[in-house]
Image (cartoon, rainbow, N blue to C red):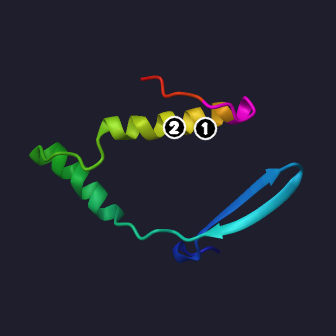
């Protein structure tokens, strides 16, 4: 089984060729993220990850998928 420090295995296909690489995982502190969410809900503390920043990430991921379906066409954010 993979361990968290083993990295992220990336498999991709281009021109019918399969490639595989391993990218290192960055250290993170998920406990701090969830503490921040709890502190926001209970104490009114500001969120470290705002809804707007989450929206932006999702928009970029959606546009990347749409661009790939369109052959790599560049696309603009909708806002």
- Write down the quadrant of residue 56 in the picture: top left
Most extreme residue toward the top is: 78
Q: Residue at left 27%, top 62%?
A: 32
The magenta region covers 68-74
Left or right, 56 with reference to 41: right
Task: Give the class, few, some or many, for how many residues have Cα within 10 Å of label 1's Cα (few <14, many ≥20).
Answer: some
Q: Nearer the viewer, residue 39 or 79?
A: 79
Q: Position of residue 79 (x, y in %)?
A: 41, 23
| Residue beneath disc 1 | 64
> Would residue 1 be counted in the magenta stretch?
no
Q: Position of residue 4 (x, y in %)?
A: 52, 72
- Under circle 1, the secondary element is helix
Left or right, 26 with reference to 35: right
| Residue beneath disc 2 | 60
Q: Which corner quadrant holds the N terminus?
A: bottom right
Q: Does 31 appear above or below 14?
A: below
| Most common SS among magenta residues | loop
- Under circle 2, the secondary element is helix
Q: Which mark is residue 22?
A: none
Most extreme residue toward the right is: 16
Tell me the distance, in whole angstroms, between the alpha carbons under discs 1 and 2.
Answer: 6 Å
Q: Does 34 appear above or below 27?
A: above
Q: Residue at left 35%, top 62%?
A: 30
- Write down the quadrant of residue 27 in the picture: bottom left
Q: Position of residue 18 (x, y in %)?
A: 84, 58
Please say if the residues under marks 1 and 2 sit with CB atoms less than 8 Å apart: yes
């Amino acid at each position: 089984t993979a361990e968290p420090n083993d990295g992220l295995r990336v498999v991709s296909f281009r021109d019918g060729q399969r490639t595989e690489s391993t990218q290192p995982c960055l250290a993170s502190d998920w406990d701090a993220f969830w503490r921040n969410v709890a502190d926001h809900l209970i104490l009114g503390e500001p969120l470290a990850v705002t809804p707007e920043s989450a929206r932006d990430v999702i928009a970029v991921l959606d546009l990347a998928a749409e661009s790939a379906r369109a052959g790599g066409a560049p696309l603009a954010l909708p806002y």
